Image (cartoon, rainbow, N blue to C red):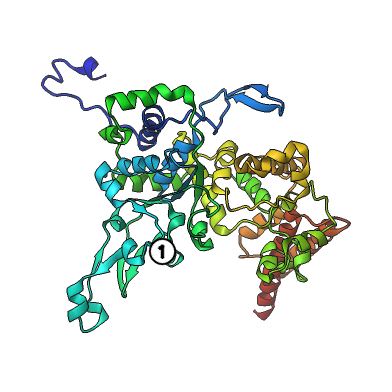
Amino acid sequence: MADLYRGPVGAGAELEPDKPQLDEKLRQAYFWIVNKAIISPHYDIEYNDGPALSFNVGDSKRILSLPSGQSYSSYVLLPLLTFATRRKCLFIGGPGRGKTASAILMGVLAGASVREVRRAMQHGHPQMTIADLLGNPLPADLINARDMAEIRIAWRSWLSMRVKIVDEYNRIPTRTQSALLTVMGDNYAEVLNQVFECPESAWFLTANDEQGGGTYQVIEALRDRIDVIVQALAFNPRFLQELLVRIEEDVRPEELMPPELVFTADEVDEMGKTIRAVEVPEGLRRRLEFFASQFELAEMAGGQLEYMTKDTARLSGIAWHELAAADNGRDRVKDLGCQTRNGLSVRNLMTLLLYAKALAYFRGNTQVELEDLRQVLPFVLHDKLQPDPDAPFFALPENAPYRTDRVSWLRRLFDLANDEYLRLDLDRTDAVGELAQQFALGLEGVGEGDTRARLVRIEKLIGQLVRGRKLYGHLYDDLLKLKYLHQRYTNYLAWLRAQ
């Protein structure tokens, strides 16, 4: 285009090519990494633009699918989305799978040199102290200070990095893990009452497995702060030629990052704002609500409706198999909640929505699609939904692989919830949703007669829902929602009378 306009009018003035939009720049970074840096031929995030060809493989008849749309490698894409949203990603996999190299690439993408990233990386080891992690007080201040406020701290340089990397985080002692939790969760470090405020950062941690199989067991709160878990899949020897070229040319991919792919802090801030603005359609939100409602119910765990949850059982210390044995009123194969030992937290759901928005943004869309949510869900909930290996679902021969393949199990779980959502026709027949929408319009101008009519409608609906039905997770949440609406209208009616 510059050549077309070069002439008498533009003589002597070179037209500077437009910079790509940030989503396009993020896509360029992905394709450079996946084609030039990280050898990852595993396109496990699949999209289809039409019918896809598939083959049955082996005695187990597993499906090899050939996606008809642009598909991606989770090992490269999920870390990039973490970088764009400044969240926390855990790489898992055996030694030598490229976990640390992938984390270093993210640091270089943020504008730091390879040397700076390597020096700032925290290496977990059994003797790691809080001072090793955060910094040391200056010796002269320790001797001369009259109170704690006069003691200055030599803070570790990694605390100010926009990309923070902790290698083998499950080898860090428990006490030091608590200090790391403060930095990860609250974005500040504290030593001797001195506080260092950290900038918003993307975090990348590595471990040989996500079960805490290092020197120390990872504390639960620290594990909960991790947003996505990405597995480093096995190297395919068919790509050995690429390794040979790197040896012969003595190159390291992280040292060859094109400068035009590097993001400034302002650009990452702008990306984050745009990602958060991506729309989640109401129908898609309802499907996620329905999926999330499947897992928390434990009917035998509480005597009052609000306490009939798996978390109540966990806090009581009762053995899980005792609770499962007492719950014999439902179809334990059909009920998705019987496959897990826990439900989803607020943090899990917020993270899931954010990564779905980030994936839609990466693909150049302004609205999240169902497939976006389906593809990121297994990586966000990888260690958040704990399976019950003794559940009848896993005893079926066709479901045996789901005992070990957590990603495929979670995606299958989401598909089963969607199938049930469609069977119940909840897009068109959602009486609870209609009552909730009516309440969301506000109570201004609603008189006593209308309020009483709405209360009667709620009571009748509850009667219909509980009549002769087994209690499943989605019905449990609907009943709690109706009780909430009933109480709000009851309070409003009392206020009207007081006027």
Q: Quadrant of the C terminus?
A: bottom right
Residue 312 lies left or right of residue 466; in this view the side is left
The residue lying toward the viewer, choosing from 371 and 487, is: 371
Residue that carries the numbered disc 1 in the rendered image: 186
Under mark 1, the amino acid is: Asp
Q: Classify residue 94 as left or right of residue 243.
A: right
Tell which of 76 and 209 is nearer to you.
Answer: 209
Q: SS for tag 1?
A: helix
- Determine the residue positioned at 72% across, 59% down: 297
For the point 84% across and 56% down, the residue is 470
Where residue 390 sits: x, y (%)?
74, 51
Tell me which residue sits at (69%, 64%) in the image: 485
Q: Quadrant of residue 482?
A: bottom right
Q: Nearer the viewer, residue 307 or 390?
A: 390
| Residue 379 location (% of width, % of height) | 54, 44
376 displayed left or right of 486: left
The answer to whether residue 366 of the structure is visible from this angle is: no
Vertically, is 288 above or below 259?
below
Q: Is residue 45 above or below residue 171?
A: above
- Tell me if 179 is positioned left or right of 378 in this view: left
- Residue found at x 53% / y 55%: 212
User: Is 69 located above or below residue 361 in the figure?
Assistant: above
